[in-house]
Each structure stands twice: as structure tokens, then as C-alpha cells.
Image (cartoon, grey):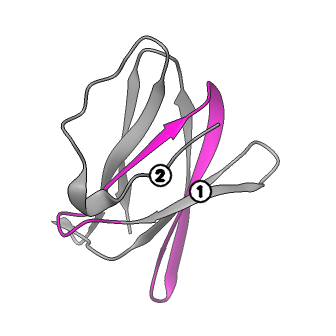
Amino acid sequence: MCGAPDQATLPSLEVSPNEAVIHGTVVKDGQPLPGAYVRLLGTTGEFTAEVQTSATGYFRFYAADGDWTLRTLAPGQSVDTTVTAAKGSAAEVTVEL
């Protein structure tokens, strides 16, 4: 299971022992990229959730344990990034477009 909260109003990051978090920033030319779309895809490529990055390029997902793919989309660009989520921790990712 996963959830994708509104990226503009996220509370500070506190991870409970029962949840796994995937979060990070999308950057282009070294600068945060607001308005990019980040999709959370399961191991077989199935769509699970999507968020739009905040004004600071930030995104966050609450996910189940396991391997996930982040598909990041911006005009004319797409990049896939593999990440592993684990209960009780936050996997931090910087996606470079």
C-alpha cells in the first residue's frame, strides 16, 4: 500500500517503525524542478501513485516494503530510478533530469 500526500503541504518527515517512505528532489541543471511528475511503479511496472513536485522540487511517497521504480516526467524528458523502501526508514533520492 502507498499514499501520495499533497506535496505543497507536507509535514516534517518523521518515519514510524510501521511505515516506509520514499522521498527526494527532482533537479535539472543543478536546480530544483517544480511541477515535474513523479510516478511510483511496482516491480512489474504497475502504476501505484503519482505526485507533482513542490516549488522546491520535492516529492514524497509512503510505500510498502520492497523495490520500486520512480518514473519522473517533465516536458520532453522521462527518467526511471530504482529505489528500495523499508519499514522504519526513509529512502532519499535525487532525480537528475
Q: 92 or 8: which is nearer to us?
A: 8
Q: 1 or 73: which is nearer to us?
A: 1
Q: Is residue 45 above or below residue 56?
A: above
Q: Which residue is mark 2?
A: 4
On the image, the x and y values in percent for residue 89 come to 40, 19
Which quadrant would residue 29 be assigned to in this image?
bottom left
Q: Is residue 95 rendered magenta in the image?
A: no
Taken as a whole, is the magenta stretch helix, strand or loop?
strand
Highlighted range, magenta: 53-79
Q: 15 or 84: which is nearer to us?
A: 15
Tell me, for residue 19, which label it has, or none.
none
Q: Which residue is mark 1?
A: 49
The residue sitting at 40% across, 52% down in the picture is: 5
Marks 1 & 2, CB-CB < 8 Å contact: yes
Q: Is residue 28 above or below residue 2?
A: below
Looking at marks 1 and 2 on the same chain, the residue that comes earlier in the sequence is marked by: 2
Residue at the far right: name it: 44
Q: Quadrant of the C terminus?
A: bottom left
Q: 17 or 28: which is nearer to us?
A: 17
Q: Is residue 3 above or below residue 6?
A: above
The residue sitting at 19% across, 70% down in the picture is: 55
Q: Is residue 32 left or right of residue 44?
A: left
Amino acid at the residue labelled 1: Ala
The residue sitting at 51% across, 17% down in the picture is: 87
On the image, the x and y values in percent for residue 42 come to 72, 45
> Helix, strand or loop at disc 2?
loop
Amino acid at the residue labelled 2: Ala
